[in-house]
Image: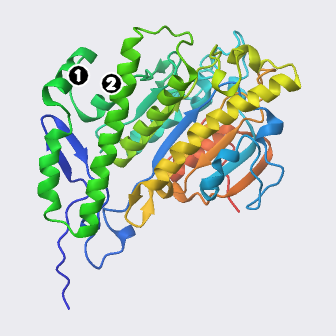
Amino acid sequence: MFITKKHIPRRALLKGAGAAIALPLLDAMIPAGTALAATAAAVKPRVGFVYVPHGAVEKFWVPKTTGKAFELSPILKPMEGVRDYVTVITNIRNKSGERQNPPHGITEQTWLTVQDPQLNTWGPQAGISVDQLIAKAIGKDTPLTSLELCAEPGGATSFTGLNRSLPLEGNPRKLFYTMFGPGDSNTDRVARLKATDSLLDYVLESSKMLSSKLGASDRALVSDYMESIREVESRVAKLMAKADSLGQLPDAPRGTPDDFTELVDVQFEMVALAYQTGQTRVASLRMIKEASMRTFPSINVDEAYHPLSHHGEDPDKQEKLRRVQTWQMERFAKFAKKLDSIKEGNQSLLDTSMIMYGSNLGNSDLHNCSQLPVLVLGKGGGFKGGQHISAPKDTPLANVLLTMSQRAGVQVEQFGDATGTFSEA
C-alpha cells in the first residue's frame, strides 16, 4: 500500500505587507506514516528565563519534602495546577554575584553570566549570558534570535559579551510590531495601525486560502491560533491607550498596582505568542528590577519593595514579602497555564519548553547569593517535572545553566564555575 498524504512545510508562513507569521504545528505538516520525532516537524525546545529581585524568604520557598511527592511551599502554591511540569531545585549558590560593592551592582548581571564582570577569565566567551549562548545555537533560523523583555525599566540580565548588555523592552505594543510588522517609532506604528485597522488583516486572506486546503482539525487550530493573536493585540491596544492617557510615566512606581499586574501579564502573553508563532525560541523576562521601590497596595503591601527586602528577620516584614513573592508566582503560574493551553500536535508548549524562574539573591536581608530560588518549568529538553531536587549544599547555579544549555542542544562542556550537570530521579 502506498501512502500519498501530502504535507506542508513546518516553516510555512502567513505573509503580507512586511509581516510574516509562522504557523502552529499542524497534522498536515507531518508526512504520512512518519513518526513525529523523525521529521522536520519535531519541535525544538523553547527556552526562557524569568527574573525576580530580592530572592525569596527561605521558609516560604523551600519545600519541606523532596522527590516527586513534595508538597508545594506557600510561595509555590500557585503552581499547583501545573505541578507535573515544575522542577524545584534547592541549595543553589552563585558565587560570582557575591561582590556587593555597591550592593545590587552586579546582582542582575551575574544571574545568567555567572561571572563577575571584573574577572575576565573565560577568554572569547567572557561575560556572555546563557540565554545568548543558547540563542546563538538554536535561534539562527527564527525571525528573532532572542527576546529580552521587562515590566519595570532599567538594568539588564542578558549579555552578548563582557559588559555588552541587551536592552530590555518594556513596551508591549513596540514588541508586538517588532515581531509582526515594521515601524521605526511608536508614532509610525500607530499610524500604520490606524491606516490598516489591524496588522492581522494583511494575513487573514492568506489564512482563509490555507484553511481551504486543510482538514477540519487543522482548520479549527488555525482559527483558534488567529483568534489568540487578535486577543493579545486587543489587550495591548487597551493597555497602551490607558498608558497614553497618563502621559510619560517615570521609572518610579506610578499608577495603580492593577495596571502593573496587567502589564506583567501581557508581557508574559507576548512571550507565549512569540513561542507559539515561531518568532523566537529564546526569551527572557525581568519582571521587576533590583532595588525596586515599587509598592503593592492590591495585596496590602504599601512598603517599598527594596526597603522591605531588608526584613531583619522581622516576621511581619517577611509575611509581606511572602505576599509579594506569591503575587510574582501567580503571574508566572498564569503564564504556565497559557502555555499548557497552546497545543502543538499531541503536546502543549509546556511539553516543549524549559523556563527557569528565579533570582540572584537568596536572603535579601544579607545580600547573599546562596539558597537561590530556582524553578524550571516545562518538560522541554527531557525535564521530567513534578519534583523537588535537593542538590548538595552550594551547588553552583552554573550547573543548572549548563544542564539547560546541553538539553537545548548546545554543544558546550563548561559554563562559568559549573562542576557538572545534574540528573533527575
From this view, report whether residue 44 is shown above or below residue 159: below
User: 372 or 319, which lies in front?
Assistant: 319
Horizontal placement of 229 versus 192: left or right? right
Identify the image quadrant of the C terminus. bottom right
Query: Which residue is labeled 1 in the image?
Result: 189
- Position of residue 36 relative to residue 393, above or below, is below
**In the foreground, 223 or 206:** 223
Location of residue 375 (image quadrant): top right
Residue 93, labelled with which disc?
none
In this rendered view, identify the residue nearer to me: 148 or 129. Answer: 148
Q: Amino acid at mark 1?
A: Arg
> What crowding class fits label 2: few (fewer than 14 Cα within 10 Å), some (14-19), or many (20 or more)?
many
Q: Residue at x 47, y 37 (%)?
A: 268
Decide if residue 211 is on the left or right side of residue 249: left
Q: Residue at x 33, y 27 (%)?
A: 237
Q: What percent of the width, then of the height, locates residue 374? A: 67, 41
Which label number is shown at residue 174? Answer: 2
Q: What's the residue at 12%, 35% (across, down)? A: 17
Answer with the quarter of the image where residue 314 lies: top right
1 or 2: tag closer to the N-terminus: 2
The image shows residue 77, relative to residue 119, as above or below, that is below
How many marks can you see?
A: 2
Q: Secondary structure at mark 1?
A: helix
Residue 419 lies, in percent from the top left, at: 69, 44
Circle 2: element type: helix
Q: Say if mark 1 contacts mark 2, CB within 8 Å.
A: yes
Q: Which x, y percent locates residue 251?
A: 52, 10
Please state which amino acid type lies under the numbered disc 2. Lys
Does residue 279 show up? no
Residue at the far bottom: name it. 1
